[in-house]
Image: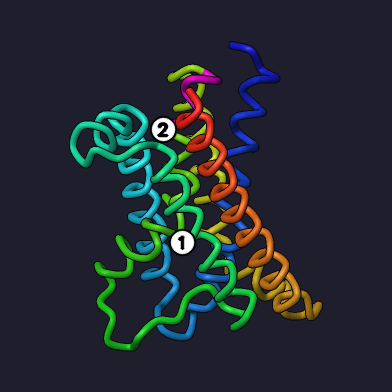
Amino acid sequence: MDIKLFFSAFFAFLALINPIQKVFVVFSLQETYSRGELRRIVDKATLTAIGVLLLFLFLGEAILGYVFNLKLYAFQITCGIVLFYNGFVGLQKGAFLSINKDTRLEELIAVPIAIPMIAGPATITAVVTMPAVYGRWMTIAAVVLALLLNLLIMRNADRIGKFLVRRNMLMPLIRITALIVAAIGLQMILNGIETFVFAMKG
């Protein structure tokens, strides 16, 4: 295995999964759920996200192309719009997620924690396209390691969040992260448009 290539894939997935954003999300849920419930949410959401991403990694092109008759550029552009909107909301409101008190724990695990916050549009697009560059098994190793590191960070979100609050860093970091999320979404839109233009020319 090419270590340099592996870490290139790993850091790409880590940036797309965006563990810092998850710290803000889990920390904001402390008032609604106990520490044990939050652990359950984080663990089950991670397992769900791994399942979804591996499904798309192995069957993504078939699912998009043959089942839904979608071109990859259409998926990229649509996912980019969703990601840009999420970033814009976080930038405007200073929060990525607001939970209704009537929301059931099981509903929260699948949506929105596992999808789209962990296995989001950018990450799904990456697992479909990156095996062509990095190879299938290196991509699997990179995405699983990135998800495990994200799990570790989410499990310690209360400690990290309290540290940031004490130093008045929480809100500035939320908005900086939201700006980065919006920028990633915009880049996905531009990449999708570029792919579309080349497809039309070719």
Q: Is residue 131 magenta?
A: yes
Q: How is the image coloured?
A: rainbow
How many numbered marks have been drawn onto this rendered protein structure? 2
Q: Quadrant of residue 74?
A: top left
Residue type marked 2 = Val
Pinpoint residue 179: horizontal percent, then vertical percent.
68, 65
Q: Nearer the viewer, residue 35 or 15?
A: 15
Of the 4 image quadrants, the one containing the N terminus is top right
Mark 1 or 2, nearer chain start = 1
Classify residue 45 as left or right of residue 197: left
Q: Is residue 148 above or below residue 137?
A: below
Q: Is residue 139 above or below residue 15?
A: above
Tell me the residue that label 2 is attached to.
128
Residue type marked 1 = Val
Tell me the residue that label 1 is attached to.
82
For mark 1, give the secondary structure: helix
Which residue sits furthest top? 1
Classify residue 185 as left or right of residue 163: left
The magenta stretch is: 129-134
Give the CA distance from mark 1 to mark 2: 18 Å
Q: Is residue 120 magenta?
A: no
- The residue shown at (25%, 67%) is 106
